[in-house]
Image (spheres, rainbow, N blue to C red):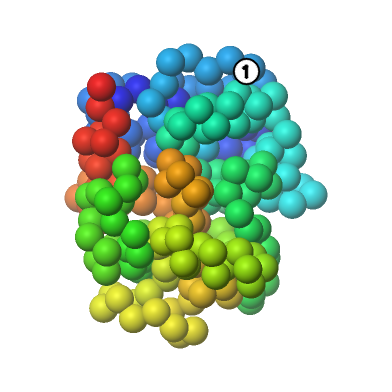
Amino acid sequence: MRAGIVVFPGTNRERDMAIALQGATGTQAVMLWHRDTVLPALDLVVLPGGFSHGDYLRCGAMAAHSPIMTAVRSFAEAGGHVLGVCNGFQILTEAGLLPGALLRNAGLRFLSHDCHLRVEREGTAFTRGWSAGDVFRAPLAHGDGNYVADRETLERLDGDGLVAFRYSDAAGRVDAGTNPNGSAGNIAGVFSRNLRVLGLMPHPEDLVDPLMGGIDGKPLFDGLVQALAA
Ligand SMILES: NC(=O)CC[C@H](N)C(=O)O
């Protein structure tokens, strides 16, 4: 699986992502710069976390207009797989590649702690390493993770099975008490209509080795390799 990681000014999670991808694929991901206009031949494009353009204007708003996003949009429209984590998720919503938006956390504080995610949709390239209802741990670190969308969109996401993950407790219970940031319906990650673009706020790439404190995030990367390995 050939993966490319897009670096914007202010991105800071690209190396975590590269390590997680290398652990799963055995090969190095290609680092891409936001001013690039052409993508090499890739199976997966990753927009990692960070503070692109210092989070000015809105998180991801300026990055969504970077030259490389035209190529990323064409890649996605041609059926390519795109993963956006945290700031990457914000960029994908700002670019219109995923529905909804990420607002300030309900408590207006930057949050940095582990959370639990319940897998809502199995069998996609991103979630084939889990079964629906599985719960895994993932660190979160964001100021703007409050997922919102209009009621129609939320109903469509639910109805079409496009919610990827919900914030839960360790037992998979989902309610206001397990919602860290005010996200509608506890949504932590969503898919595009064709299930080939995924955005999520927490960071599975930061739990892929026992030395990191656990391997809860590994199924994402191992599943992608199984799905996309040429
Ligand atoms: N870790 C991240 O990618 C953070 C995203 C963004 N800067 C926020 O605070 O919401």
Identify the residue at the far right of this view.
Answer: 57
Q: Residue at x 36, y 51 (%)?
A: 204
Please tell me whether residue 32 is drawn above or below residue 197 in the rendered image: above
Mark 1 lies on a secondary structure that is: loop
Confirm if mark 1 falls within 8 A of ligand 1.
Answer: no
Please tell me in which quadrant of the rendered image residue 81 appears: top left
Q: Position of residue 185 (x, y in %)?
A: 51, 74
Which residue is nearer to you in this view: 156 or 53? 156
Q: Residue at x 64, y 17 (%)?
A: 37
Q: Position of residue 70 (x, y in %)?
A: 65, 27
Q: Position of residue 55 (x, y in %)?
A: 70, 48
Q: Position of residue 199 (x, y in %)?
A: 49, 50
Q: Residue at x 77, y 47 (%)?
A: 56
User: Which residue carries the number 1 mark?
Assistant: 36
Please tell me whether residue 185 is drawn above or below residue 49 in the rendered image: below
Location of the C terminus by quadrant is top left
Look at the image and tell me whether residue 106 can be seen: yes
Q: Residue at x 26, y 78 (%)?
A: 171
Please tell me in which quadrant of the rendered image residue 136 appears: bottom left
| Mark 1: amino acid | Asp
Which residue is nearer to you in this view: 213 or 203? 203
Please tell me whether residue 117 is drawn above or below residue 46 in the rendered image: below
Which residue is nearer to you in this view: 98 or 108? 98
- Left or right of 7 in this view: 25: left
Location of the N terminus by quadrant is top left
Which residue is nearer to you in this view: 103 or 163? 163
